[in-house]
Structures are given as structure tokens and as C-alpha cells.
Image (cartoon, helix red, strand yellow):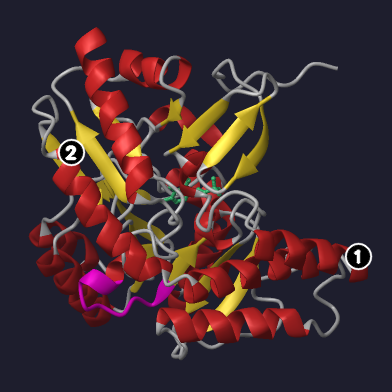
């Protein structure tokens, strides 16, 4: 049987990972500044993470959501404490798209309405409502077009007001830092204003923290840079350090009802063990503070490279913008300098999404390699 061929692949086969490094089947060592797409939060194969998952799978890998699972409560308690969102309620699922799908569905249940406001260049995943709220026609099938979604430019409060006044909107969904779209950000003024407008019109305000959450921006959630309190927060990538787990945090004003949301695999024992291990390490290694400090060093070093026209993003969710398309540069970095970086829909942007355990020496290696690569292309 062949694989359904939907991914253009780099010609490398990683077989082992250790903190910032991955090793391929030829024994070649790569510096991972892509984190498998912002997924690797605490470093590849962290010993505490490996032990927690190994111990759990030996004890009990899975049972359904029909029974008591104290690991879910432990995860919720630790997540509440570290994020400062302990008054929210946690619903667990398996991926970022699923988190947003549940967030949008919940907003529709609560408000009894169905239109969604999303933003230009936003990305929220591949499932039905999530992909409909994603500003990319080429990944929306006719089936997805049944959703009623309006896309607005970022940072235009008057456009948002104009739409919400119509009274048919269930949710406004927004990334506090756009990931796939290329690291553009809504302003504090816009986010606070949008929250006000949502309150005024009875619309739920959903912050998609799938990529920006879990300490990546230097705070646990990126919206926490803006002094707002969303109705629903969606999370996934950094949450399991590669183990598939996602979730939503639901504001206490939203009441749960049996059967409202549900999943077979979400919140299973093994996923919870992975999620708890991640939170333990973020806390013990003080990775949020580290992300803040090390990103300041990163920015200072990048400023020594004149070809970089702009540095976008926050913390360890960074984008380096050039005045040329970076496809060739990324290939050179992977195949010759052995460094993984990310791209985005902005073809001139190099995305840097390393594990939060990155150190100055890794940054120095990258800066040296980038300078060389820029001279060579
Ligand atoms: C902001 C954001 N939301 C949602 C998703 C979808 O997550 P997943 O691929 O886990 O479904 C992504 C994935 O890149 C993302 O960056």
C-alpha cells in the first residue's frame, strides 16, 4: 500500500531526538529550530517525559471517558496553577483543529447562533468549522463552505463592530500571534476592544493558542501579554511535546451539559501522562522565564545580520523577514548547515520555533550558519 501523497517532504529520516537535536538514519545530527512545527516544548525525549509515558503505558495506556481518570484532574490542576487560568474548566481532545472545532461548537451551543468572525491570514486547522475559519480557500472543500464565516482585517475595530451589530455571530476566533500566516499580531488595543465588543453583543471570544501557548511567547499564553480574559482558549502543540493532545479552557460562566462535547481518545491516560510531564518540566526548568531571556539574546544576535529586514513574533515564536523568498535558504540550512527552520505563507519569512530549552550556544551556531548561508546563496 502506498501513502496518500499530501506532503512535500524534505529528504531526511529522523530516527532519534535528544533535547535540541535530532539524528537521521544516516547518523547525521541536526539542530532543531523548528520543533516539529512548534510542538517540541521541553526538548526531544526529555528523561522525565520518557519515564512518565513509559511508566503509564506499562500500567494503563487507555480507557474511555466513561470512567474516573484522576490523571485528567492532575493535568487540570497543574495547568490551572502554571497558566494562572485556574478558574477555567478544561476539556481534553487530541489536536489543535479539534480544540478549535470544539471551541466553535461550544460558542454556537451557548449563543444559539452560527456565524463566525475570523481574520485574514488566520489558520485554525483542517476540520470542518476550523478549516472554514481558516483564510485559505485551497484547503477548504465545498463541504466546508456550508459554514458561515466572515474574514476581517486584523486591528480594525470598526469592521468588527459593523459585523457584530448584525446579531448573528456566535464567535470571534483569533490567534494572538499568527503562526502559519507569518507572525502578524493583533494589537493590545484591538484585542481589548474586540473583547469589549464581544461582551456587548453576546458573542464568545476565542483565543487560538494552539501554536502560541504553553510558554512559547514568554508567558504561558500569548494573550496574557494583552490583559484580556477570553471566553475560550484552545491549546495543542506544546501540550504533549509530540504526544497528540489538545484541549480547550472554558470560562466558568459557560455551563457544561452532559453530552455537549465528547471524544473517545481525548484525555486518555497516556496523553495525560505526557501532558503532566510537560507541565512538570516547564515549571521545574522555569522555561517560560527562560523563553523570555533567551529570546532577548536571540533578537540581539539577529540584529547583527543586515539581510534580516524585520524580526517578528514574541519569545520563541519568531520570524525573520528577508527581502527575498527563503525556500533556498531553508534548504541550505537543512542540507548543508544541518539546521531545521520553518516556513510560512509569507514566503520571505524564516520561522524559528525551537524547543523552549534552547541555549545561547545553539543560537550562536544558528547565527554563524545563517551568516554563512546568506553569503553563499
Ligand atoms: C494557530 C493554529 N491553530 C490550529 C492548528 C491546527 O492544529 P492541528 O494541526 O494539531 O490540528 C494549527 C496548526 O498549525 C495552528 O498553528
- Chief SS of the magenta region: loop
- Secondary structure beneath disc 1? helix
Q: Residue at the spot x=26%, y=33% of the render?
A: 367
Instruction: Looking at the image, tell me whether mark 1 or mark 2 is earlier in sequence order.
Output: 1
- Binning the other alpha carbons within 10 Å of mark 2 as few (below 14), some (14 to 19) or many (20 upward) gives many
25 on left or right of 104:
right
Q: Residue at the spot x=42%, y=79% of the render?
A: 83
Taking depth in this image into account, of 305 and 351 the one nearest to the observer is: 305
In the rendered image, residue 294, in percent from the top left (x then y), is placed at 29, 56
- Secondary structure beneath disc 2? helix
**Disc 1 to disc 2, C-alpha distance:** 45 Å
| Magenta-highlighted residues | 224-232
138 on left or right of 321:
right
Q: Residue at the spot x=64%, y=73% of the render?
A: 276
Taking depth in this image into account, of 138 and 375 the one nearest to the observer is: 375
In the rendered image, residue 199, in percent from the top left (x then y), is placed at 26, 81
Q: Is residue 231 magenta?
A: yes
Q: Nearer the viewer, mark 1 or mark 2?
A: 2
89 on left or right of 261:
left
* Quadrant placement of the N terminus: top right
**Mark 2 sits on what residue?**
302
Taking depth in this image into account, of 153 and 148 the one nearest to the observer is: 153
Taking depth in this image into account, of 348 and 181 the one nearest to the observer is: 348
Res. 67 in view: yes
| Above or below for 115 versus 348 | below
Which disc number belongs to residue 184? none
In the rendered image, residue 327, in percent from the top left (x then y), is placed at 34, 17
Amino acid at each position: 500500500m502506498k501513502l496518500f501523497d499530501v506532503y512535500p517532504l524534505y529528504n531526511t529520516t529522523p530516527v532519534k531526538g535528544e533535547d535540541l537535536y535530532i539524528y537521521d538514519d544516516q547518523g547525521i545530527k541536526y539542530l532543531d529550530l523548528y520543533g516539529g512545527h512548534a510542538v517540541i516544548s521541553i526538548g526531544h525525549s526529555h528523561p522525565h517525559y520518557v519515564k512518565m509515558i513509559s511508566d503509564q503505558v506499562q500500567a494503563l495506556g487507555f480507557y474511555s471517558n466513561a470512567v474516573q481518570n484522576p490523571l485528567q484532574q492532575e493535568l487540570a490542576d497543574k495547568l490551572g496553577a502554571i497558566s494562572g487560568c485556574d478558574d477555567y474548566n478544561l476539556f481534553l481532545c487530541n489536536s489543535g483543529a479539534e480544540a478549535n472545532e470544539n471551541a466553535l461548537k461550544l460558542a454556537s451551543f451557548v449563543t444559539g447562533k452560527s456565524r463566525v468572525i475570523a481574520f485574514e491570514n488566520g489558520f485554525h486547522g483542517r476540520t470542518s468549522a476550523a478549516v472554514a475559519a481558516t483564510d485559505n480557500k485551497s484547503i477548504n472543500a465545498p463541504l466546508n463552505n456550508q459554514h458561515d464565516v466572515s474574514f476581517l482585517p486584523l486591528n480594525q475595530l470598526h469592521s468588527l463592530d459593523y459585523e457584530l451589530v448584525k446579531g448573528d455571530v456566535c464567535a470571534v476566533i483569533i490567534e494572538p500571534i499568527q503562526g502559519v500566516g507569518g507572525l502578524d499580531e493583533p494589537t493590545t488595543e484591538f484585542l481589548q476592544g474586540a473583547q469589549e465588543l464581544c461582551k456587548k453583543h453576546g458573542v464568545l471570544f476565542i483565543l487560538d493558542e494552539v501554536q502560541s501557548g504553553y510558554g512559547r511567547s514568554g508567558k504561558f499564553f500569548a494573550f496574557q501579554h494583552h490583559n484580556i480574559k477570553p471566553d475560550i482558549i484552545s491549546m495543542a502543540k506544546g501540550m504533549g511535546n509530540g504526544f497528540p493532545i489538545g484541549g480547550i479552557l472554558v470560562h466558568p460562566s459557560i455551563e457544561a451539559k452532559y453530552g455537549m462535547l465528547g471524544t473517545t481518545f481525548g484525555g486518555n491516560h497516556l496523553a495525560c501522562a505526557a501532558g503532566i510531564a510537560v507541565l512538570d518540566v516547564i515549571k521545574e526548568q522555569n522555561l517560560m522565564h527562560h523563553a523570555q531571556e533567551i529570546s532577548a539574546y536571540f533578537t540581539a544576535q539577529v540584529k547583527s545580520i543586515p539581510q534580516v529586514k524585520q524580526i517578528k513574533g514574541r519569545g520563541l515564536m519568531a520570524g525573520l523577514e528577508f527581502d527575498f523568498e527563503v525556500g533556498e535558504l531553508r534548504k541550505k540550512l537543512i542540507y548543508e548547515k544541518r539546521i531545521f527552520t520553518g516556513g510560512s505563507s509569507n514566503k520571505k519569512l524564516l520561522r524559528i520555533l525551537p524547543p523552549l530549552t534552547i541555549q545561547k550556544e545553539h543560537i550562536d551556531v544558528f547565527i554563524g550558519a545563517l551568516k554563512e548561508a546568506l553569503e553563499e546563496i
